[in-house]
Image: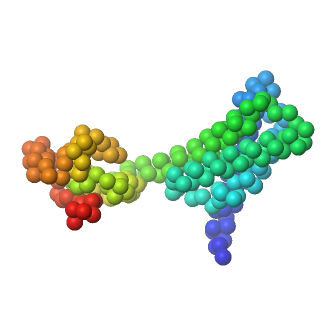
Amino acid sequence: MPSQRSVKRIAVNIALDGGLAAMAAIVAHWLADPRGGWLHPLWFLAGGGITLVLAGAPFRLPQHYWRFSSVADLIAVTKGSAAAAIAFAAGLLLTGTRWPSPTFPIIHMLTLLVFLGGPRLAWRIRLSRAGARQAADPAETRHVLLVGADEIADLFLRAVGSRAVPLRIDGLLAMGTNQPGRRIHGFPILGMVDEVETVLERLAAEGRRPDALVITDPDLR
């Protein structure tokens, strides 16, 4: 059974999504028919919010944790936006209301996607940057070199970048021959794994010799 705090969070999400969807509806109306004005008809506000809340429920939009929004959440937002736009357009037809333009359902869906997906993505990026800015004690910070530029290295870099960790990534050593010179999350791939001694000597000459190597490729352990 959901806790009281979870219920409140879901209620807040419903209110936020409904409010954003209401604004998206009037913006979509204006984009489809600029001469029609912003708030005419005014019931677009309520209709846009209600259809999104109902159409988004099967995709669990009210249960999204904005702080940890992922690609899967954005896909759900896309599906919910499409369902809400279709439901809203169908409602207009059933009530005998003319669409602002023939392309209104598409405009409405794209507007919903921006209004619902944009804040989620912005919130996630903001918190990730805030965590990265929380500086650790310089005396405790260790310089490390990642070995193995694969999916696990990507996860490691995401984790380090999202919170205050006393680590400084100086670069990566890759497995493939075509990877040196490229970057992952802004960190340079300095060479291949079998060039570890050369890379370490170069970093030492630059005064950047790492304190440790972090093995991210299981095949190297």
Q: Residue 70 placed where, x, y %?
A: 51, 54
Check the image and report above or below for 28 versus 78.
above
**So how many labels did they put on this image?**
0
Instruction: Say left or right for 173 vs 20.
Output: left
The furthest residue to the right: 96
Residue for point 62% across, 50% down: 77
Residue for point 64% across, 73% down: 3
- Quadrant of the frame with the N terminus: bottom right
Q: Which of the 4 image quarters holds residue 205?
A: top left
Coloring scheme used: rainbow
Residue 179 visible (yes or no): yes
Instruction: Say left or right for 136 vs 47.
Output: left
Instruction: Say left or right for 26 vs 153.
Output: right
The front one of 145 and 136 is 145
Residue 146 visible (yes or no): no
Q: Residue 91 placed where, x, y %?
A: 84, 44
The furthest residue to the bottom: 1
Check the image and report above or below for 194 versus 181.
below
Q: Residue 63 placed where, x, y %?
A: 63, 61
Q: Residue 155 placed where, x, y %?
A: 37, 57
Instruction: Say left or right for 41 vs 176.
Output: right
The front one of 182 and 19 is 182
- Quadrant of the frame with the C terminus: bottom left
